[in-house]
Image (cartoon, grey):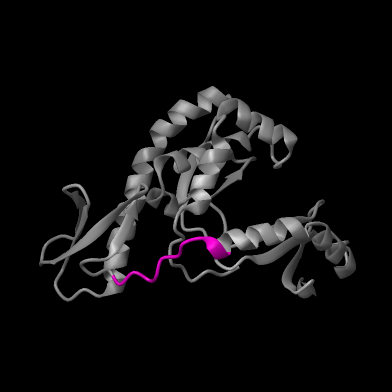
Amino acid sequence: MNTEIEVSGITVDIRRKPIKNLHVGVYPPDGRVRVAAPERLDDEAVRLAIVSRLSWIRRQQRRFSEQVRESAREMVTGESHYFRGRRYRLNLIEQDLRPSVRIAGVRTLELRVPSGSDAFYRRNVMERWHRQRLYDAIPDLIETWAPAIGVEVSECRVKRMKTRWGSCNITARRIWLNLELIRKPPACLEYILVHELVHLLERHHNDRFRRLMDEFMPDWRIRKDVLNKAPLGHEGWDY
């Protein structure tokens, strides 16, 4: 059952689930607050939980409001596009050959598409290229980090995600990474993968989880900050 309440001027979406603990999330692009609450908790109990977290919620909302946003990409020559943390100028080439994407020179991203293709088609070509580049990067990272952390991964997949950078199915030992990560600095991709691998040792974001992150990746907080300050891609965000 989904309900909505207002706490100190903040609209809160409540989604009740068969879970034990209450979880509060603040999501881009505008800091929408969503709560996953145990079915036994009423709205007043959720309200008290939100009040106790108001300072943290407002800090997260302020961070989102200050973050640089990209406008919708029209996929035309001259646009800026990010890849592995670097900004490139798009050069659109229309020709009746197989569509392709490549880095040309130092700062140019060359997109070749059939003549007359629309923006939707061009975005799909770019997305397929991004997806393959991310898949290409994953095996070496897992080979490095899984043994170092002492875990085994059955599968690592890529998908578009609206509200998180990665997720982990602990039972299946399956990791999902947000396609958007290929546009961020490589250190950020590495941080998110390690974050999800550590969840195979500790499910929750508690003190033990943070100690493990400190042990395996001492600079993870710096990487997290870099990721959070990177420009947000234009999306039709939903919840």
Q: Residue 40 location in percent, x, y? A: 88, 61
Q: Position of residue 53 (x, y in %)?
A: 78, 57
Asked if residue 162 is among those painted magenta in the image, a careful observer would answer no
Residue 28 appearing in the image:
no
Q: Which residues are magenta?
A: 65-74
For the N terminus, the quadrant is bottom right
* Res 207 visible: yes
Q: Residue at x 74, y 35 (%)?
A: 207
Indicate left or right for 206 with 169 as reference. Answer: right
Q: Nearer the viewer, residue 221 or 166?
A: 221
Toward which corner of the image does residue 80 lie, by quadrant?
bottom left
- Residue 44's place in the image compared with 191, above or below, is below
Q: Is residue 140 above or below residue 56?
A: above
Looking at the rendering, which quadrant does residue 74 occupy? bottom left
Q: Residue at x 31, y 59 (%)?
A: 81
Magenta stretch, overall SS: loop
Query: Residue placed at 34% from the left, 59% from the top?
Result: 127
Q: Is residue 67 one of those drawn in magenta?
A: yes
Left or right of 146: which side holds 109?
Answer: left
Q: Position of residue 237 (x, y in %)?
A: 52, 69
**Residue 65 or residue 187, whichever sits in front:** 65
Left or right, 122 with reference to 164: left
Residue 21: percent from left, percent from top: 81, 51
Q: Is residue 111 above or below residue 237?
A: above
